[in-house]
Amino acid sequence: MSGWSLIHVDEPMLSFGFNQKTEHPKDGLFLYGPPASNLNPARMDVGVIGTAEGIRRYETWVKSLASTIAAPETGREENKTMWPGFEAAFGAPWPSKPFASITIDGDLLSRRIRSEDRHEAIFKAVDVYGDALRKYLREQEARPQFWFAVIPEEVHRYGRPKSIVPRDQREKSSGTIGRRAAKSILSGGSLFVEEMEAAALYQYELNFHNQLKARLLDTGQVIQVVRETTLTPSEFEDGVRRSLQDPASVAWNLATTSFYKAGGRPWRVAEVRDGVCYVGLVFKLIENAKGRDNACCGAQMFLDSGDGVVFKGAVGPWFSATDNSFHLSREKAAELMGMIIDSYKEMHGRPPAELFIHGKTWLEKEEWEGFQSTVPPETKLVGIRVRRQNELKLFRYGSRPVLRGTAILVSDRRAYLWTTGFTPRLNTYPGREVPNPITVDIVNGDADLRQVLKDLMALTKLNFNNAGFADGLPVTLRFADLTGEILTAGPTDVAAPLPFRFYI
């Protein structure tokens, strides 16, 4: 290819009920409902863990989902879609009475999250939810499709890495050994079981949300963490009330992710390429790492259907401060790819015809050879580098920014793709600054660059965490940071691949 070429990648169509196709998830769900699937729930059997007030707020919110909610009269154009009611949108009832309820002690939770030792505070607050769930699983046979963990506002406020509890509200810690002593015990060991147990809580991240998700992975239960202020914002005073989206948008977004976590598929990409899967590489730097092992690796595999699986790789010296990038050894790349191929074969009975690896950095020679070594000969393997950048701007005549889907082909292996920009269906650009493209490089293997761009556009529309029109990054990389945070939130022993809905 000589010279630069300007093209436009058509907006990918999504498939819904009765094989109908539209561009916008809300249009499709509003008019046709989700595509037919044996996985779609016939009824939303949802469990709730929360204080008595939290459970009441959940029931109040679910009742509001049953009927219509008007679209906002003001605000951004892309949000102006009325909520038609849950059963009207998804074809399944959602009873306001929970399938299972676990009431936790609000006073105990409040005392624990206010501990003067922040590691103890978050660890013990997570215990309130974790212990209650594990007790239920031991004693009860009925299993909901997933759980709402309803969080009081004070837990959110004081359960974050840099949160500070006012001095006059702090609770005295229950005899913890302190971070410095814990570090010494964890690195050198101890003859006393009590000391090792006391030191263990300092291995976990100071983040209630991530720690709760990570520590409950072994239960096999899908968790949706939601704040009380999200469910009933009007019941809170101005000092506590949050600047939320309008009620219709909250209903669309939280209902969509709930349907997905219950096992359903809200929509699919209309033009499915059979036998193709996409893998996003996940890396997370480990704070206070011991020795050379400074990062955790993982992978997110996605199909055009939206099915996703997360694989946890090994901890190792994957981060290089020299070029600020992450790379696997040949051995670990082969091990990770082996898990991905095995999982795909288990799902489909055969290996993929094409497998695209999406990463934010270049793949080194040994790393690529490791991936290749466990891919069967009939699978075409391609490495794609995708990164955000602001080195290139493109302007249109008039007041509207560049059209979403615009692409500049620099060569047969490099392009700039505007995954954000003016969107005709929304009649607006859902952003504030001049849209920047993503840079797309085919770094290993061979592929048709135009097809790669089409695939990336389609993957921006597979975020089931909301009902938005599209994201700026493909789903393979959109949640890489969040997945990495949960994989490294603590020393969890869960190594088996888990569906993506466990992590979002």
Image: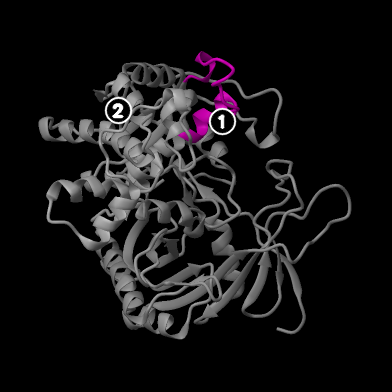
Few, some or many residues within 10 Å of mark 1 (<14, 14–19, 20+): many
Q: Residue at x 35, y 42 (%)?
A: 119
Report x, y in % for residue 225: 39, 35
Q: Write down the region rendered in magenta.
A: 232-254
Evaluate whether residue 273 shows in this view.
yes
**Is residue 412 located in the magenta-colored stretch of the structure?**
no
Query: In this rendering, would 311 be left or right of 69?
Result: left
436 vs 53, nearest the viewer: 53
Query: In this rendering, would 23 be left or right of 93?
Result: right
Instruction: Look at mark 1 in the image and give the residue it sits on.
Output: 249
Which quadrant of the rendered structure holds the N terminus?
A: bottom right
**Gap between marks 1 and 2, in whole Å?**
24 Å
Disc 1 secondary structure class: helix
Identify residue type, mark 2: Ile
Label 1 or label 2, whichever comes before in sequence order: 2
Q: How many marks?
A: 2
11 vs 360, nearest the viewer: 360
Query: In this rendering, would 358 be left or right of 350?
Result: right
Query: In this rendering, would 289 be left or right of 105?
Result: right
Report x, y in % for residue 434: 77, 52
Quarter of the figure with residue 222: top left
Instruction: Look at mark 2 in the image and give the residue it sits on.
Output: 49
